[in-house]
Amino acid sequence: MPSTTALLTALTGLNANARSIDVIGNNIANINTTAFKSTRMMFSNMFSRTISGGTPPGDTTGGTNPHQVGYGVKISGTQRDFNNGAITTTGDSRDLAVEGDGFFVVTRGDETLYTRDGAFRQNSANDLVTINGEKLRGYAVDSDFNIIAGSLTDMNIPLGGMPIARATENVTISGNLKADGALPTAGSSVGVGSSATAGFATVSGAIPPPGTGNVLELSTRLVDIEDPAQAGLGAPLFVADQTIELRSAEKGNKTLATSALLITPATTVQDLATFLADALGIDRTVGNNPDGVTPGVTLDPVTGRLTIVGNTGTANDLDIDQTDLRLLDSAGTVAGYPFVGNKAAAATGESVRTTFVVYDSLGGTMDVDATMVLDSRTSTTTTWRYYIESAADSDVNAQAATGSLVFDTDGRLQTTTPIAVSIDRAASGVTTPMAFDLSFFDDQTQLTSLADDRSQMSATFRDGAPIGSLAAFSVGQDGIITGSFTNGLNRTIGQVALATFSNNEGLTDVGGNMFRTGANSGPAGLTTPGTLGAGRIVGGALEASNVDMGEEFIKLIQASTGYSANSRIIRTTDELMQQLLVIGR
């Protein structure tokens, strides 16, 4: 007799296999979905009707097994395959793939979601977002570009913005100094007076008055110097609020920066002498020149003439024309040229100068001059003196460093320790002093002192950078986002975070390649790529779907066969019922 149980059992088979085809269809539909994870349908049998529970073996009989008839199949559930899909290169630095078990952390409004789809792009606020607008989360950096771990934030990549600069910290000079050059004999000597031969004198009643036999002293106030054009009339050459300006003077054919001395009622001849020495870049700490004269500015109190003596070396030779020292009134108008220079001697000695650029903390540029002057020779050494100066120094005195370099008989520098250079930058808005190390030796180049036609040197290395903006970025395996700036600097600007779960299959699929935590997934563990099993990040790539088309087709054949077979059961049962009805007619 046909059984209606067979009809219902076959119906469960139809339903189960139909749902399996649904799952297979979804897998195949997502064959090209980025980072899609395939799903499989799992079946289990339904409860069975027990006709006999079976009997144990006896002394004379064997045992019997249970006698049961099943009532069909049911869907146990689905299982998602979280194995990695193939990593495909895109060449776009904004595309990211996870090679491991981690998930990108994103936010949709106030909700935190998780995804394997790394096709991120920037929105109008420069945040990295998914195709549907969820924001990528990670770790930001502090003002020194150090990762701030522990607190997630939106990953913001402001291309064209984020201006930065870097102060110079290291400079290297290389070249060759002519070891057989001429030794120095003297520095420049320039006499300064009211004419080519005459000096200056004080007015009657000067306070303090010059000593007996003197016409001028270093302690004399400038406002007490008599105007030579009105001698004997008590008319002063200078008055308060006027300015003495040095401009266009040359040192070794290099035009010096303009400097100014404001005349006050207390300004003295000593102040003028100090101003001239500083403005001309004369280093007064190096001791006497070979002729026994000390570099600097001195006064002959009997004649009232000033004498300017420079440092040795042709690169330190001073040229001062009458128009280079001018007097300005309080409105800045030229009031005259009261100083007349008379050059008595030129500086001698082999020397060379090079100029290089350094950057301050705001990315501003400063010219720095390095001058080398042959100092002495012995049977075992050659000694050169260096002068480092910069017109960017906020003081009138441009000298930044001086010292000696000693070379052996092979022309090699005997000490490779860098020299410290410090430039005063007060009231300039930048870090002051501007300090950097100047080296004459590195792994590739060095300064030597060998016989040659002439001395040559130049700056072969300098770090630091002017202001630049973010031009591009890349993401490393550890999630570190490195920004490339237009000034050539590279800086860490963030780090992508990953989440891990104790049971990935417990996550809830909410569509759009997004998951949220489920009851059986466990809480998200936030970490950085490469730690806690999160895997590494591959920049410029995307994870492909892990659907295996061949496997899905096999499953489709099995499911359609199962469906057909169950429909055959229904048809067979129907035929038996029809035959039974025929018997009853």
Image (tube, rainbow, N blue to C red):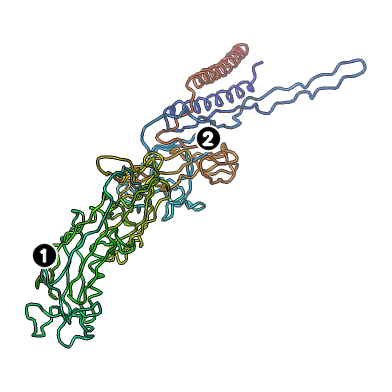
Q: Which of 226 and 108 is in front in this view?
A: 226
The amino acid at mark 1 is Thr
User: The N terminus appears in which quarter of the rendering?
Assistant: top right
Give the total of numbered labels.
2
Give residue 106's quadrant in the image: top left
Tell me if residue 66 comes above or below residue 214 in the rendering.
Answer: above
Q: Which residue of the protein is positioned furthest toward the right in this rendering?
A: 59
Other-residue count near label 2 (Cα within 10 Å), few / some / many at <14 / 14–19 / ≥20: some
Q: Which residue is drawn at 28% across and 66% down?
A: 395
Other-residue count near label 1 (Cα within 10 Å), few / some / many at <14 / 14–19 / ≥20: some
Q: Where is residue 129 in the image (x, y as percent from the top left)?
A: 39, 44
Looking at the rendered image, the disc whose residue lies closer to the viewer, 2 or 1, is 1
Q: Position of residue 313 (x, y in %)?
A: 25, 53
Q: Quote the CA–CA distance across marks 2 and 1.
A: 77 Å
Q: Can residue 128 be seen in this view?
A: no
Q: Could you say whether the residue bearing mark 2 is in a helix, strand or loop?
A: loop
Q: Where is residue 169 in the image (x, y as percent from the top left)?
A: 38, 52
| Left or right: 252 as drawn, with respect to 574 | left
The label on residue 143 is: none
Q: Which residue is drawn at 87% across and 19% down?
A: 57
Tell me if residue 287 comes above or below residue 302 in the rendering.
Answer: above
The amino acid at mark 2 is Gly
Mark 2 or mark 1, earlier in chain:
2
Q: Which of 532 and 329 is in front in this view?
A: 329
Q: Which residue is drawn at 41% across and 48% down?
A: 493
Q: Mark 2 points at which residue?
A: 100
| Left or right: 234 as drawn, with respect to 156 | left
Q: Mark 1 points at which residue?
A: 323
User: The C terminus appears in which quarter of the rendering?
Assistant: top right
Q: Is residue 449 visible?
A: yes
Q: Could you say whether the residue bearing mark 1 is in a helix, strand or loop?
A: helix
